[in-house]
Amino acid sequence: MKFEKGLSTATLLSNEVKCKQVALLERDILLKNLKSVLESLRGQVAGKYKDEFEESVSMVDILAVQLSKRENELLQQKTEVTRIATSLKLASEDARRIVDEERTNARMEIENARAVVQRVQKVLQEKENSSQRIGKQVNCI
């Protein structure tokens, strides 16, 4: 149960990582489009707006670098989540196999114990029958 719960959690984390990847991809496209628009406007800006324009271009570049770093972090997270999910799946399968083996062993021990009990009951029944026969023979004499 605990392993399956962990596996479920790992699957949820994996799905969350996938959603973040899609969001990063969309942001990357938006940043590229924004940079393209800014580059096309570069020649049309003059005077005091030129400094503000250059600052805007610089901010877009900074955002692109931050996005790249975040993408790398996300790839590392995805790798880690995948590794954890695989480990949990293997652990769950191992645990299930061990439980099945122990269950089989317990059933065999129970069957062996029943067989021993039946033999003891049979021996006791035979002793009781012998005692009764001996008691009848003694009474007859």
Image: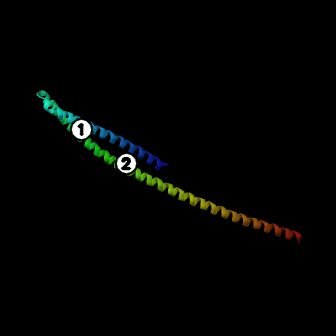
Q: Position of residue 84 (x, y in %)?
A: 39, 50
In this rendering, the answer to whether 110 lies above or below 27 is below
**Other-residue count near label 1 (Cα within 10 Å), few / some / many at <14 / 14–19 / ≥20:** some
Q: Position of residue 44 (x, y in %)?
A: 14, 30
Q: Secondary structure at mark 1?
A: helix
Q: Position of residue 139 (x, y in %)?
A: 87, 68
Q: Secondary structure at mark 2?
A: helix
For the point 76% across and 67% down, the residue is 126
The amino acid beneath tag 1 is: Lys
Q: Nearer the viewer, residue 98 or 86?
A: 86
Numbered badge on residue 32: 1
The amino acid beneath tag 2 is: Val
Q: Is residue 93 left or right of residue 133?
A: left
Q: Nearer the viewer, residue 132 or 57?
A: 57
Q: Earlier in the sequence, mark 2 or mark 1?
A: 1
Decide: marks 2, 1 in contact (CB < 8 A)?
no
In this rendering, the answer to whether 116 lies above or below 27 is below
Corner quadrant of residue 125: bottom right
The colour scheme used here is rainbow
For the point 19% across and 33% down, the residue is 38
Corner quadrant of residue 114: bottom right
Q: Is residue 110 left or right of residue 63?
A: right
Question: Quarter of the image containing the C terminus?
Answer: bottom right
Corner quadrant of residue 66: top left
Q: Which residue is mark 2?
A: 81
For the point 46% across and 50% down, the residue is 3
Residue at the limit of the structure toward the left, as seen here: 47
Label 2, label 1: how many angstroms apart (C-alpha)? 29 Å
Q: Nearer the viewer, mark 2 or mark 1?
A: 1
Residue at the limit of the structure toward the top, as seen here: 48
